[in-house]
Image (tube, rainbow, N blue to C red):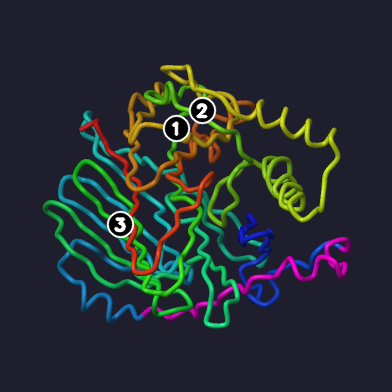
């Protein structure tokens, strides 16, 4: 199973298995950080734990009957299937909130799967589902003792369903986190010509709340070589390691090569009291090489890339010439767009790695909510092929 990561202030906390207790998620500091002169400067944040609530299928069927949504138990999870009469279909797993499928009607009269999802065997023989559309966020605040608390919402509860199969269906999930004063809503909307994923955060706490992360969408393509991003020109981009997430679908060598090792190395740097002049110069040179301005009007995605665009338009288009279709990717509330391509080298056409991952993100700069603030941000997939 692909590893996940929680990013706390000043430290990197890897999570190796889903069964790891929260108290065991934090790695000890390196020995040179444990020296007495550093003890007062670095405090290990608490990792909040939110208990999982079992799913009552009978209640779901009775309470939300008639909205165009059906429920089914699949491998210990609940699959909620949304279906419109024009042929649009989306499926979501609970309690994870992972959208595993979005089938959209096309101009030729058929339906095409727009999301890339892969199922593999986990470490303990369980089914591991990756890809699709998922939330990948870390929230930080302080408790009553002024200790820093960090958590990533992962277990969602179905709160409400609105709409019907004639026009649109909206599924509302909630997660209160470790405190009742911080409210999270995940709103998924299926429309005749699109699919939306929106996150709403309300901070009723007396202290600020900081959020980093993204809504990740894996869009299936014939092959990255046949796929082009249109509308990103003149945007500033910054190269970053591939985002670590429980649900991100990474080529076999990408996590080890660009993920944990590189992020851990960069996170340790901030703990060191000083770096030599040569190291600083090398770091500056690397930083210059890792940023630039997008000049391609039709950016071909055949090379492996992992880029964060800081001032990209609110929407751009992905065109797949192999499948002869396109998807308009939009965002709201977020200031950044993440674009990942596994590249075409060694990737077979129409395989599990034939996808492009797009994230509406807060990676370069966190989103900060003041006390009593409410923030909304979303990712949207528009189907122009009807």
Asked where in the image residue 146 lies, by quadrant, the reply is: bottom right
Image quarter (top left, top right, bottom left or bottom right) of the C terminus: top left
State the residue in front, 276 or 266.
276
Placement of 211 over or under 101, stated as above or below: below
Graded by Cα atoms within 10 Å as few (under 14), some (14 to 19) or many (20 or more), the crowding at tag 3 reads many
Identify the residue position indicated by label 3 in the image.
188
Spatial separation of the CA atoms under disc 2 and disc 3: 27 Å
Residue 221 is labelled as 1
Say if the magenta span includes residue 49.
Answer: yes
Labels 2 and 3: the sequence-earlier one:
3
* For the residues bearing labels 1 and 2, Cβ distance under 8 angstroms: yes
Residue 355 in view in this figure = no
Identify the residue position indicated by label 2 in the image.
224
In this rendering, the label closer to the viewer, 2 or 3: 3
**x then y, percent, for residue 135:** 45, 56
Secondary structure of residue under mark 3: strand
* Residue found 43% across the figure and 39% down from its top: 219
Stretch in magenta:
31-55
**x then y, percent, for residue 381:** 32, 41
* For the residues bearing labels 2 and 3, Cβ distance under 8 angstroms: no
Placement of 261 over or under 282, stated as above or below: below
Placement of 212 over or under 311, stated as above or below: below
Labels 1 and 3: the sequence-earlier one:
3
State the residue in front, 368 or 335.
368
**x then y, percent, for residue 10:** 67, 59
Secondary structure of residue under mark 1: loop
Image quarter (top left, top right, bottom left or bottom right) of the N terminus: bottom right
Say if the magenta span includes residue 87.
Answer: no
């Amino acid at each position: 199973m692909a590893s996940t990561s929680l990013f706390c202030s000043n430290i990197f906390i890897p999570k190796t298995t889903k069964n790891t207790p929260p108290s065991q998620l934090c790695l000890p500091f390196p020995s040179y950080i444990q020296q007495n002169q550093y003890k007062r400067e670095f405090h290990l944040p608490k990792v909040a734990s939110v208990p999982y609530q079992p799913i009552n299928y009978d209640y779901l069927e009775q309470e939300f009957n008639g909205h165009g949504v059906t429920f089914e138990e699949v491998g210990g999870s609940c699959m909620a299937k949304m279906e419109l009469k024009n042929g649009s279909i989306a499926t979501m797993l609970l309690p994870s909130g992972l959208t595993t499928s979005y089938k959209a009607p096309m101009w030729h009269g058929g339906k095409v799967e727009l999301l890339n999802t892969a199922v593999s065997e986990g470490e303990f023989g369980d089914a591991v589902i990756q890809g699709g559309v998922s939330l990948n966020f870390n929230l930080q605040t302080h408790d009553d003792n002024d200790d820093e608390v960090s958590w990533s919402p992962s277990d969602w509860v179905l709160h409400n369903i609105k709409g019907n199969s004639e026009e649109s269906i909206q599924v509302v999930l909630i997660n209160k986190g470790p405190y009742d004063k911080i409210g999270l809503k995940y709103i998924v909307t299926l429309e005749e010509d699109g699919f939306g994923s929106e996150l709403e955060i309300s901070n009723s706490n007396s202290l600020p709340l900081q959020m980093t992360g993204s809504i990740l969408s894996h869009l299936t393509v014939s092959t990255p070589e046949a796929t082009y991003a249109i509308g990103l020109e003149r945007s500033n981009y910054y190269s970053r390691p591939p985002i670590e997430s429980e649900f991100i679908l990474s080529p076999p060598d990408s996590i080890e090569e660009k993920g944990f090792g590189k992020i851990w190395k960069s996170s340790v740097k901030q703990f060191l009291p000083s770096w030599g002049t040569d190291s600083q110069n090398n770091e500056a040179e690397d930083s210059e090489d890792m940023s630039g301005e997008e000049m391609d009007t039709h950016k071909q995605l055949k090379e492996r890339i992992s880029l964060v665009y800081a001032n990209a338009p609110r929407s751009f288009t992905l065109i797949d010439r192999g499948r002869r279709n396109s998807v308009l990717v939009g965002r709201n509330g977020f200031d950044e767009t993440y674009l990942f391509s596994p590249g075409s080298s060694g990737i077979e056409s129409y395989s599990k790695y034939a996808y492009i991952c797009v994230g509406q993100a807060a990676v370069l700069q966190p989103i900060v909510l003041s006390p009593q603030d409410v923030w909304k941000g979303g990712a949207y997939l528009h189907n122009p092929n009807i």
